Image (tube, grey):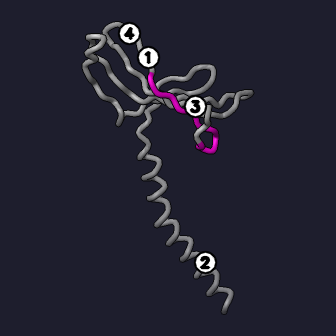
Amino acid sequence: MKGKYFITTGIVLILIFGAILIPQLMENNNSDDFIFVAEDSLGPWYFDKSSIEERYDQVEGISVIDVWVKHDIDQEGNICVRDELLWHIDPAQMRYKFSDAFAFDEAGYLIEA
């Protein structure tokens, strides 16, 4: 009798934890604002859709799009890192530059240079 009770209790607890945790995990996966753009020989590139900002650069006299971009370097033989860069894109001249850059190791810790 006790064996059936423990099995039933275990199944109920698993179902409860599943009902609580699965929606949270799905929400966390959908909250990532980075969208895949392309892939090169080192790994995939993404841009952060929530960071896109258009502005007028008074120094250059041009309209610029600012956006955070990340590059996951994950190919065989390379150190697994993520670079996050703030790009300033000039769509009229098809050029860009970046002003901020951060690198993270595979555990997500900031790599100091």
Name above or below for residue 62 compared with residue 67.
Answer: above
**Is disc 1 placed on a helix, strand or loop?**
strand
Q: Which residue is mark 4?
A: 94
Residue type, numbered disc 1: Lys
- Determine crowd level at label 1: few under 14, some 14-19, many 20+ residues with C-alpha closer than 10 A: few
Magenta segment: 99-109
Instruction: Tell whether position 107 is magenta.
Output: yes
Residue 33 shown left or right of residue 3 in the figure: left
Measure the C-alpha gap from mark 2 to mark 3. 40 Å
| Residue under the point 46% across and 66% down | 20
- Determine crowd level at label 3: few under 14, some 14-19, many 20+ residues with C-alpha closer than 10 A: many
Mark nearest the camera among 4 and 2 is 4
Measure the C-alpha gap from mark 4 to mark 2. 60 Å
Residue 96, image x, y percentages: 41, 15
Residue at the far bottom in the pictured view: 1
Which is more N-terminal, label 1 or label 2?
2
Name above or below for residue 42 compared with residue 48.
Answer: above
Measure the C-alpha gap from mark 4 to mark 1. 11 Å
**Is disc 3 placed on a helix, strand or loop?**
strand
Mark nearest the camera among 2 and 1 is 1
Q: Main secondary structure of the magenta part?
A: strand
Residue 110, image x, y percentages: 58, 40
| Quadrant the N terminus occupies | bottom right
| Residue under the point 41% across and 39% down | 33
Identify the disc placed on residue 72: 3
| Residue under the point 29% across and 13% down | 59
Residue type, numbered disc 2: Gly
Residue type, numbered disc 3: Asp
